[in-house]
Amino acid sequence: MAETLDDILKRAAEHKVPRRSFLAAAGLLGGSAALAACGSGGSTSTAGASSGAGASAGASAAASAAASDAGTSFPPAGDVEKQLYMYNWSDYVSPKNMDAFKAKFGVEKFQYDTFANNEELLAKLQAGATGYDFTCPTAEYVPALVEGGYIQKLDWSRIPNATTMDPAFLNRPWDPNNEWLMPKDFGTTGILYRSKVVKEPVTTWTEFNDLIVGKYSGKTVFVDSMGDVFVMPLKMLGKSINSVEKADLDAARDILLTLAPHILALDSDTYQVKLASEEAVLCLGWTGPMVAMRADPKTADIMYSVPTDGTLFWLDTWVMLKDAPNPNATYAWFNFIEDPENQAEETNFNGYGTPNDAAKKFIDPAILNDPVFFPPEAAMANLEGAVDTSSNQQRIDIWQEFKSKIGS
Amino acid sequence: MAIASEHAAQGAERRGRSALLTTVLIAPAGLWYLVLLVAPLVIVTVFSFGNRARNGGYEAAFTLDNYVRLLTQPQRMEPFFTSLWMAVAGTIGCLLVGLPLAYFIATRARRRKGLLILMLVIPFWTSFLIRTYSWLILLGKDNLGGFIGGVIGDPEFRILGTPFAVLIGLVYGYLPLMVFPLYVTLERMDRTLVEASKDLGAARWATFRQVTLPIALPGLITGSILVFIPMMGEYVIPAILGYGRTFLMGNALVDAFIQTRNWPFGSAMAVLLIVIMLITISVYVWFVNRGRLGRDVSVL
């Protein structure tokens, strides 16, 4: 049955969080959620709001002990400001939470501006003052923000709700002392497949590899993303996804060049279309399109596998900008959003896993046991965070060579 | 001519006022040109001699490394050549489709002229991205791709993901930019010249070659340049219709700026791209004009 343009566009639109999609910048998928506060309506009294923040600051002495060392002094807490400026990925924060926050703290204007990729965020900050209070880089970009002096350390005593973070996301190389970032959402790089066609098990990269070069040659899509594609050969070799060792990369190159002729497309933006039409039945990709594809009876057999031999997880993080004009409102928001119920609402809205353990009991068990949102235990143990390896010349050369051999 | 001589006869005072008016009127365009063309060009050129900062981006330096790397590694130059031949093929495609179309609208369509022009413009009301997406369906397995595959009996046959699909996308996307300049020149053509040519015994082809084509030439040059330049930098069409298999300059630039965050190297590619385009267009214009001069001389 022929697929109509309508179907495809609907799916593109439903593809809620076009993270990492370059074309999002071009406008179709972006749907830039400019949720500028329209109609201030019934804002509660400022006095009540600030006392709320004050109370949470007071109750959090215990939380601060672990994170903030004695040498760091933070400015004292003040009244929650009437406005707040957020710079974030599009459609990434629940409007319900934003409205509840405004009502609770008497914030009249909560501006939500969007960027399409980390590069755009970096460029904007490098270009000078932005007027934003906080933003949401992917974790491996945070060291660059620290080095550039664009963000400030977090005063954990003012975010007591953040004490229930899953330790798996703390003390990572991008923030070894947990000073700068608060984990927001995470996801994995994995394997999408049409289970009505692919009956074979696809639980490891090695199994995936054998299917690509064997039975499903010419029916596999890879996302067009260097960091994600390198995960596969390196994990097949049992190496770190971040390896820049020459021997490791030489071996990875052999695997990639063997794969290249069997790949249908390198595509980060429309791989769900190829999976829907069954032109591709296997895909190295992200969980983004899963929810929408399952909702459609024609593509409901789509499955997502987090390879048990290890894969990459990305982590988006809340960070506070150096010159945040509204620091008190920012802390109020950071604490508000880590409230377990609000955090569960975020996962329900944006379809990404929360790193906040306390939120899990408010999440539908069906979602909680779904590898799309939360990888199974076996896979979780082998997740590895990405560090920035994009400057490695050998990787760049292999990537270029791989690209030139796709499908040929 | 008459206007020009009248102008020259104006008094000095009047001339001063009109100079002021000219300045005022040109200022927005001049500013636009300065801010959006000259400044970025200068920045890109400066960046191309810099280093990649440790965390990506640009770090001030003076080095030729980026250019050396580009020019000495053959695989780095591949996207340039792929882009070049795709853009040339795309321009020829636009010409083959656009010239008859423009000729028809200008000379034969009569009352339907406005309607046809409107039909050319209407697609522009929709996002370029959506129009490119729609080709995914038209050329896909369920439609043209599958149909041709059925006819030739090859179930694996496909159009999408081939350079041909990219070419179709390019010609489709940029055709109006070729048609409009051609239409304008052909529309103003004095039809009696064609009649005169026929009266003097020239056959259809000879009339076309010796009368219509030279008249259409300015439009043809403008149209070719208008379609050639954006085709050289095209990113979306090869990414969507080419399945990332046809790797053009636009794609290489995205890799450099977004994936490896090596702005200086990307800038060097951009500068080289500009140089290649300038050379190509100069050669083209020179070639076409030489042909015209040659004909003018032979007529004398």
Image (cartoon, grey):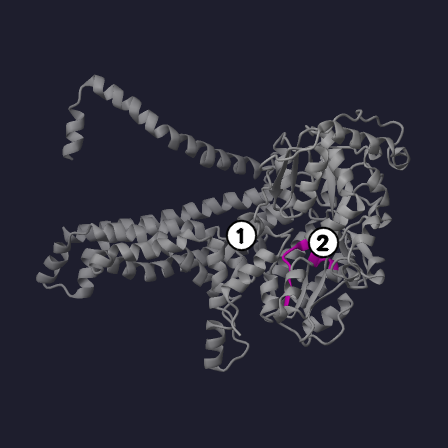
Which of the 4 quarters of the picture holds residue A277?
A: bottom right
Left or right, B42 with respect to B220, comes to: right
Which of the 4 quarters of the picture holds residue A144?
A: top right
Tell me if residue A139 comes above or below residue B9 in the rendering. Answer: below
Tell me if residue A86 comes above or below residue A400 in the rendering. Answer: above
Residue at label 2? A348
| Residue type at tag 2 | Asn
Q: Position of residue B124 (x, y in %)?
A: 40, 52
The front one of B223 and A342 is A342
| Residue type at tag 1 | Leu
Residue B288 can be seen in this image? no
Say which chain tag 1 marks.
A
Q: Position of residue A303 (x, y in %)?
A: 71, 67
The front one of A256 and A59 is A59
The segment highlighted magenta reads A219-231
Q: Position of residue A249 (x, y in %)?
A: 74, 57
Q: Residue at x 74, y 43 (%)?
A: A317
Q: Which mark is residue A28?
A: 1
Tell me if residue A218 comes above or below residue B62 in the rendering. Answer: below
Left or right, B172 with respect to A223, comes to: left
Q: Is residue A226 magenta?
A: yes
Q: CA distance from mark 1 to mark 2?
A: 23 Å
Question: The residue tagged with tag 2: helix, strand or loop?
Answer: helix
Left or right, B141 with respect to A299, comes to: left
Q: Position of residue B123 (x, y in %)?
A: 40, 55
Q: Residue at x 83, y 53 (%)?
A: A361
The front one of A44 and B72 is A44
Q: In front of the other: label 1 or label 2?
A: 2
Q: Residue furthest left?
A: B199
Left or right, A195 with respect to A338, comes to: left
Earlier-in-chain disc, 1 versus 2: 1
